[in-house]
Image (cartoon, rainbow, N blue to C red):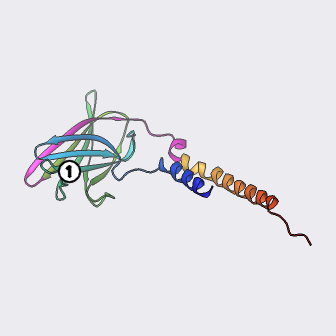
Amino acid sequence: MRIAAGLLIVISCACLLSGDGGSLVARKQTGPFVISVFAADAPVRAGKADLSVMVQQVSDESPVMDATVMLRLTKATGSAVTEVAAPATHAKATNKTLYAAQLTIPSEGAWRLSADVAANGTNAEATADLNVMPPAPPAERYWPYIALIPFAVFLFAFNRWLRRRRQFLTPRARP
């Protein structure tokens, strides 16, 4: 019973966990590099977005650790062009084989993602279309924290019920 309860808790928490880089947004082979861009949240939403880049050699797919990476998002609306750019570095990444940057995307819509990489005297660029969704409503963002309190109350009530049940099932010593 305890093992089943433990497995249930682990499985239910697994949906809240993310990998180091997130969801793959783009993967392109350009020049001597394979450039992969990951988004921490899927789908990407307006507001703060964590993007990570992995730069690999085409020959052996080993990570390039000494590259300079710049992430750019551009959106053309009529005659106005909005651009958001940030350098991606190892310091901002949890996984140190990735280059990470945090960008603030001002609005939803169709954006053009560009990852500019310079390493070993070679420049490369990977581009992709990125569909940015509207910001998440607060209830959607904070539901794990909101659900924690009723879950704790349920666990407490379940514990009390099991103790009371065990009390009635165990034989009592007669005086």
Q: In the picture, which quadrant includes the N terminus?
A: bottom right
In percent of width and height, residue 116 lies at 18, 46
Identify the image quadrant of residue 115.
top left
Q: Nearer the viewer, residue 85 or 37?
A: 37
Name the residue carrying label 1.
Answer: 55
Q: In the picture, which quadrant includes the C terminus?
A: bottom right
Identify the image quadrant of residue 2.
bottom right
Q: Residues within 10 Å of mark 1 (few under 14, many from 20)?
A: many
Name, please, the residue furthest toward the bottom: 175
Looking at the image, residue 23 sits to the left or right of residue 2; the answer is: left
Residue sitting at x 73%, y 57%: 162
Name, please, the residue furthest toward the top: 78
Q: Nearer the viewer, residue 42 or 84?
A: 42
Of the residues shown, which amino acid type is indicated by label 1?
Answer: Val
In percent of width and height, residue 5 lies at 60, 54
In percent of width and height, residue 17 lies at 44, 51
Looking at the image, residue 149 sits to the left or right of residue 19; the answer is: right
In percent of width and height, residue 24 lies at 31, 42
Q: Nearer the viewer, residue 47 or 131?
A: 131
**Residue 65 versus residue 41 in the image, above or below:** below
Which residues are drawn in magenta? 119-142
Q: Is residue 127 magenta?
A: yes
Residue sitting at x 54%, y 53%: 7
Q: Is residue 14 magenta?
A: no
